Every structure is written in structure tokens, then in C-alpha cells.
Amino acid sequence: MAVDGLSINLATVREQYNMRQAIEACLKQDVVAIAPWRDQVHAIGLSEAARIVADNGLQVTGLCRGGMFAAADAAGRAAAIDDNRKAIDEAAALNADCLVLVVGGLPAGSRDIAHAREMVAEGIAAILPHARAAGIPLAIEPLHPMYAADRACVNTLEQALDICDLLGDGIGVAIDVYHVWWDPKLGEQISRAGAGGRILAHHICDWLVPTTDLLLDRGMMGDGVIDLKGIRRAIEAAGYQGPQEVEIFSAGNWWKRPGEKVLATCIDRFRSAC
């Protein structure tokens, strides 16, 4: 029996497996939904990755990632747009539910975050017609403010939804609990996202106390302070009924453990803590 409602973002076992091996390991534990990263796809080839997905009837809950739109010059912005169009084509080949966008931070030498956010909106607008034609929804993932300078200058669900409202159909949000759990407006913005049909993905892990590395010390669900069940209730009440996608970066812990044990723990915690 498939583990209903669970997806594994393959970053969770990226140090143990390549994409092919990770899929085999997931299938052994009856997980039939995944979210690969582009580097994992490129390592085995897009056609082979698409074949494996199709042959096994897998749901691809998202492809990670597009974005990184802000750049110091026009050539950099154009290169980012071209790369995002390629990412859309890759997502379409995998029949992915969405392309996740980590939008990018400040361009080199800049202190103007407002302008960076304008470049993000302009960049998404430039690729949106291609995404619509390919049938691939774009999912803006707001990242915790600690990443505003280098990874994502869109830091709240409210900011992401403002861009969605500006640009119209074909765009929504990926709600990653690691990045948004602290937001005092989270409940109302989840409701807003649901009312607009904008919730495209729901990523889960946990926030450890203490956190020893802000990028690479995410916790297994149940090991930290995030109200996972409460956020899930809010997201489902807003109308999203898709899988929860486990996405854990853990250089000092989970990436060092046997992959099959990591996946088994993900399944157990999904059932008990989420």
C-alpha cells in the first residue's frame, strides 16, 4: 500500500543516493511521490529521469528549483530567464505538479532590496507565458528572512501572494514550514492563498533549538518547535489536499545516516507528528 499523502523531496537523501537510487529506495517503502532537484535530474539525464518517473507511475510534486532572478546587469537577468525557461521544460518532461521558485537575493554590490523584489516580479512575468504554455504552474517559495540577502528577497507568504495577484493565473506558492512558521500573519495568508487557489506545495521538516547551521541543520518532523499539525490543518482548511513533501537538509545528522532508515523515519514521523 502506498504511503498516502507523503512526498519525499530527494534533497532529504541526496548524500546517500542519486536520483535513480533514491526512487528505488522510496518505492521499497511504498512512497510513490517525489520531488527531485535539477542537478539530480541532470546527473542521470532528463530523458532517463522522465522514463523512470513514468515507468513507476510516480507523482512529481515539484521540481526544485527555478528562480534566482535578481542580477547586477541585464545580461545576468537575461541568463536567469533563459535558465528558468529550461527549468520549465524539464518540469514538463517530468510531468511535475509545479516548478518551485527560490527567487534570489540582492545582486552583487546592491543594498536595494526593494529593487531586487521588482526584478523578481519582472523575471517571473517574463517566464510566465512559457510556463502557461507548458502547463507548469510556478510556485514561489518565500524563504525565512535570514536568506533575504543571498537566496530569496521574498520572505513572507504575503509578499509572495502579492506577486501572484499582480501576475495572474499560472502562479502560486510553495508553503515550506521551515521558512514561514514564525510569521504572525501566517494563518490569514494561508486562508488568502487557499481562496485564490494558490497553494501548490506544502513542504515539511522542523526547526531545531538550537539550530547549529541555518541552511544545513533542518530537523526531522517532531524534533523541533514547529506546530506541524496546526499548519497542516490550516492548509487543508484552505483547500489544499495534496501531499506533504519532506524536505530536510541535514549535513550533521540525517545525511550521515543510512538512506533506508532516513526514509523509514520520515514515514513514521509523517504519520505521528504531522
Image (tube, rainbow, N blue to C red):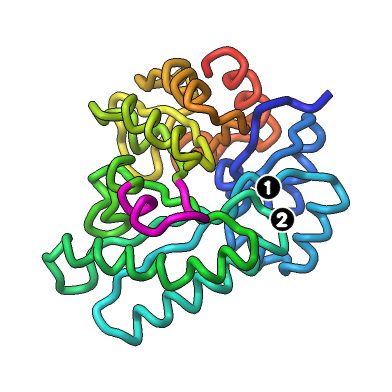
Q: Which quadrant would residue 206 be assigned to in this image?
A: top left
At 44% across and 75% down in the image, what residue appears?
81
Q: Quadrant of the N terminus?
A: top right
Is 89 within the magenta? no
| Residue type at tag 2 | Asn
Residue reaching furthest to the right: 55
Residue stretch rendered in magenta on the structure: 162-172
Q: Nearer the viewer, residue 125 or 70?
A: 125
Q: Which quadrant would residue 69 be assigned to in this image?
A: bottom left
Which residue has dot 2 on it? 95
Answer few, some or many: residues within 10 Å of disc 1's Cα (few below 14, many 20 plus, some between 14 and 19). Answer: many
Q: Is residue 11 above or below residue 4?
A: below
Per the image, label 2 sits on a secondary structure element best described as loop
Where residue 170 sits: x, y (%)? 52, 55
Give the mark, 1 or 2, whose residue is nearer the N terminus. 1
Q: How many marks?
A: 2
- Residue 149 visible somewhere in the drawing: yes
Are the residues tagged 1 and 2 within 8 Å (C-beta)? Answer: yes
Answer few, some or many: residues within 10 Å of disc 2's Cα (few below 14, many 20 plus, some between 14 and 19). Answer: many
| Residue type at tag 1 | Val
Which residue has dot 1 on it? 60
Q: Is residue 161 above or below residue 240?
A: below
At 48% across and 18% down in the image, what residue appears?
233
